[in-house]
Each structure stands twice: as structure tokens, then as C-alpha cells.
Amino acid sequence: MSIRRLGEFGLIERFRKAIKTDPSVIKGSGDDCAVMRFDKKHYMLFTCDMLIEGIDFTSKEDPFLVGRKAIAVSISDIASCCGLPRYCTVSMALPRRSKVLTADKLFKGMYDICRQYGINLVGGDLSRADKLIIDVSMLGFVEKNRLCLRSKAKKGDVIFVTGEFGGSIKGKHLRFIPRVDEARFLSERFKVNSMIDISDGLTQDLSHILKASSVGALIYEDLIPASKEARDLTDVLSSGEDFELLFTVSLKDAKKILKRHIVNFKPIGQIMEKKYGLRLIDKSGREKVLRENGYRHF
Amino acid sequence: MSIRRLGEFGLIERFRKAIKTDPSVIKGSGDDCAVMRFDKKHYMLFTCDMLIEGIDFTSKEDPFLVGRKAIAVSISDIASCCGLPRYCTVSMALPRRSKVLTADKLFKGMYDICRQYGINLVGGDLSRADKLIIDVSMLGFVEKNRLCLRSKAKKGDVIFVTGEFGGSIKGKHLRFIPRVDEARFLSERFKVNSMIDISDGLTQDLSHILKASSVGALIYEDLIPASKEARDLTDVLSSGEDFELLFTVSLKDAKKILKRHIVNFKPIGQIMEKKYGLRLIDKSGREKVLRENGYRHF
């Protein structure tokens, strides 16, 4: 059987099922970060993201922004668990023909955002490939009582998002702001039941929460903030790489967020029973069943 | 200027000089692992290694052994710092045409050696590329008083190695045993002044110690254990991927090691003053100046 037939998530699920970990691992693969014991008050977060020329960026992109993105996607994963990023390593493969100027710009893009977020770039590996490849591994820390995963969404929770959706390919995917501040703000004041960052598309990533939490959801087209760059509803729901946060809180906390007029967080729907599946009320009031149709590698 | 002209180590040096880290980082890039504060008694070790089809293995190799190697090279880095490996993540890009069977074998190769060494495989990222790429990030821990770096070799130290050198391409590079047990044995009983694993070739990796420690060295052809697979002296000194340990201890500790007939460790020479450079006494008793001519990507 080819991996195309099994699919990206099928293959990941196949591996995940086989893996056993020791009790120091609070959460292994299957969330935005792995979570490990650290000290009395904190967990350690560990994540990795690989960017490949022709998939995650084109050869025409500014290398500074490509380097920036390579780090930013991992920061976004740490943010999704409400953590603070702290250390990273970078494995990079460059084409033989590359210029030192290009390498310098890539490095500057990485290093600038590392400094901005207080991340120590502590090591790396350099190799050669036909196309540029950057893989970043990042460690972060989160207070035990502020850790947020995909698996604790509850029926009745209100679903919120940060920012806008769709059309990220036109530039946002290279310039997005990882939502560390927003996640830290939330987890200090509210009980965030579940959270994920939107990398594969709103529908697909929301589905990850629904699956991990064994719940369903209803979202409203009218409420989803669409980017000016978005082509249509499919683009808003499925194009991915928005790198915004999607999270759920109890109705009580939702009311507090709305009352305080915290403009960074917009409600888009609510968590339902599992059997409800995932549905959308469109602008004309019709209910549609949504399918997971975000980005897939195979 | 092209990166070929600046070279792999020139480019790494260029990046390294620009990087600043906070006081929690004991050692940033420039050793086998990054070293960070962890708790009262331990440091945390962090390393990454990228393997690329056509460079680190061919498409004809058994995927089980390729997966095994991807993990083993990072274990070897942790061993070089006298640490114990504990957690890892794997970023992998597969060609679209890959079979599930191949993916399964890759995974089994990784997972088997992880279990053997007590490593938790806690996460990963899956992508697509024309050639198979595997990047592993690993975390380990070491007691503060047992940490070993490249930078503390002292004039008069005896240079030891584990195992045999040369001809690794004929199979050892896929089947080598990461020297964790040896490193832990040593660091429990002796003061290991410096240590490195031989990935780029004996001469080149010894040179890394000499540079980091500001010393020179004299080694003896007669004393260097050559593998049966080794073609000639150049192969023994420069072909790389032996993944053996090279370390230096004081003359006093060296005598203890030799007196106890610990067969795993063979003396091959001694640390000299910096101005001496790196020299070899060949089988006919002639002294040669050695140049760094191990593996380079560019």
C-alpha cells in the first residue's frame, strides 16, 4: 500500500499507536507539543517543524522571511500549549549553489525572531540538499496549571479564535505573529479547556480538537473573521497556515471575555455532543456538515 | 561568495559568532550537544542531526537500518557529553511514492533503538520531499560533575579511542553501537578532560578538540585501531562515520585505565602544546603533519 492511500494522518496515527512512553511523559505525540515533567511548578514542552522549499515556501521568497517562518511555526506550537518558548536548535540543508548572502539572510530571519521572543538558539546541524530544508526543534516551559491541550474541550464550551482566516498564502504565512502573548494572557485569567494553532486549516484543526476531546461543534460563517485576502469560504475554512489560535472556554469564561470587550478574541461557535459532528450555519442560515479538507502532504 | 568557498565549518563559525545566549545556557553551539541548566545536580543536553538520502545513506539501504542510524547519531552526540539520552522528536519527509511498508520499517528501526536506550519518542513532524529526509532532535541529562566537552584537553593528556576506524561505509555506519555505556563507565571512574564522537573522521574531529582546547597533539599510526574494512591510513584517519569516542585524560588516569586492562579503550597519542599542531608518527617512525581532511558537505 502507498502512503498516499493511507494519508498523512493515517500514517501518523499508525506510528502513534505503537509508541509507549515512561511516566515522565505527560503527553507524547498527538498534540502541538510533547509535554514532559520538569520541576514542581512547570512542564517542559518539546516540538519540531520541518519546512521544505516548494511546499512551505518558494525559492523566490525573501530568505529572511523563510528563516523567520521556520522559527515562528514552532513558537506557535509552544503558544498553543500556553507555554513560553526558551531554547531551539536548527537543522538546515542548503543547496550547494547557495550564496553566503542567502545563508546570512536565513540566519538573520531566524535569529531576529528568536531574540524577539527570548529564545536561545543553542545548536544546529548543517547539511546539503537539492532544495532548502529547515527543521527547527524548540523547547518551552509552562506552569502546570496553565498547560492547555486539544483534549479537554467540553460540551457547551464557546469556541474562540484570534485574528483572521484565509489567504495566508498571499503573505501572512511568512509574516504572522505567533500568539504567545494572547495565550499567556488567556491562561493567566481564564480556564482554557482546549487550544490549537491553525496550521492545516480551521476545519481540519478544529476537527483535531473534536477528535481528541470526543465532542462535536457548531460554527457560524457570520462569526468567522475572514481576512481581506481570503477568496471565499473554502479558503477561510481550509487553506491553512493562518497560525492563529483556536480555543474553547466555558460559557461563564466566555461571557467574561465578551464583557471585557477583549477585541483579540472572537467567538465563532460552540462545542456540541460528539454525535453532532462538525457543522456550520452559513450566511443564509442553512446548516451544513463540514468535512475535514485542509492541507495534506500525501 | 558561494558557501562552497566559505565551507561548512566557515559558515557554522559565521553563525556561531553572531549568537548570544542567556546565562541558563552553559554551552551553546560548537560542541556535540548544547548544555543547559536543569536542576541542582544535572545539566540538560540538546542535539539535532539531519540525515539525507544520497548523503548519509542510499535509497538501496534497508529502511530499518536507516531509521536506526537517524536515532543512533544523536545518541552518540549525547554519549560524547557523557550524558544519558531521554527524549527525542523526529521530523521526516517522505517521497510521495513511498510504501507504507517502507515507512513502517523506518519507524521500527527508530523505535527499536529508542527502546533499547530508554528514550521516549515524544513527537514528530511529517512532510513530503523528493528524497527521504530524517531530522532527529534529542534531549539527554548529565550529572554536572560528569559533563564532558571538547574544550578541556590539557597538555600531557593521553588520547584514547573506543573501537576501530575506517571502512565504515561498508556497513558500520548503519549498525554502529552508540558508546553510551563506555562514556558513562569512564565518567564515573575518571576525570575525562575532553571527548568527541568521530563522525567526520578521526583527524578532523581530533582537530575540533585541539581548536576548542587551544592545544596540539601527537598520534601514532601503530596505535590507531584500524578496522578490517579500512582501505588504508587515509581511510582510517579521514573517512568518518565511525561513531567511536575519542577522549583525553591525565597521564595519571591513563595509567589507571591501562593497568586495569580495560580493553575497550586504546591510547593513540598525547596532547601537546598548541604550536605543535597535529602530527602523526607513521609505522616507519617518520613524523608527518596532519591536515584536516574529513567529510565536508560543501
Image: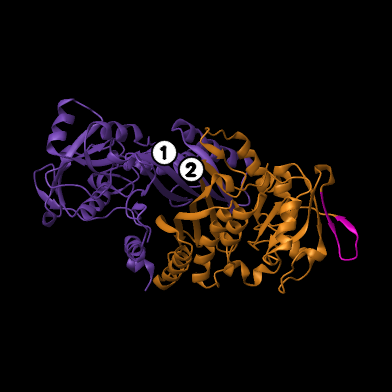
Chain colours: A orange, B purple
Is residue A201 shown above or below B1?
Answer: above
Residue visible at 36% across and 63% down in the picture: B19
Residue span colored magenta: A278-288
- Res B167 → quadrant: top left
Residue visible at 42% across and 58% down in the picture: A121
Q: Chain of mark 2?
A: B
Number of the label disc, if any, that sits on residue A197: none
Residue visible at 30% across and 42% down in the picture: B147
Give the quarter of the figure containing the C terminus of chain B. bottom left
C-alpha gap between disc 2 and disc 1: 8 Å
Q: Where is residue A154 shown, x and y percent of the image?
A: 74, 45
Q: Amino acid at mark 1?
A: Pro
Query: Looking at the image, which is closer to me, A77 or A253?
Result: A253
Q: Is residue B182 left or right of residue A93?
A: left
Labels 2 & 1 near each other (Cβ < 8 A): yes
Q: Is residue B296 left or right of residue B160?
A: right
- Residue beneath disc 1: B85
Query: Looking at the image, which is closer to me, A114 or A42?
Result: A42
Query: Looking at the image, which is closer to me, B232 or A15?
Result: A15
Q: Chain of mark 1?
A: B
SS for callout 2: strand
- Residue B154 in view in this figure: yes
Q: Where is residue B80 shown, x and y percent of the image?
A: 32, 42
Residue A283 colored magenta?
yes
Query: Looking at the image, which is closer to me, B148 or B107?
Result: B148
- Residue beneath disc 2: B88
Q: Where is residue B209 shown, x and y percent of the image?
A: 24, 50
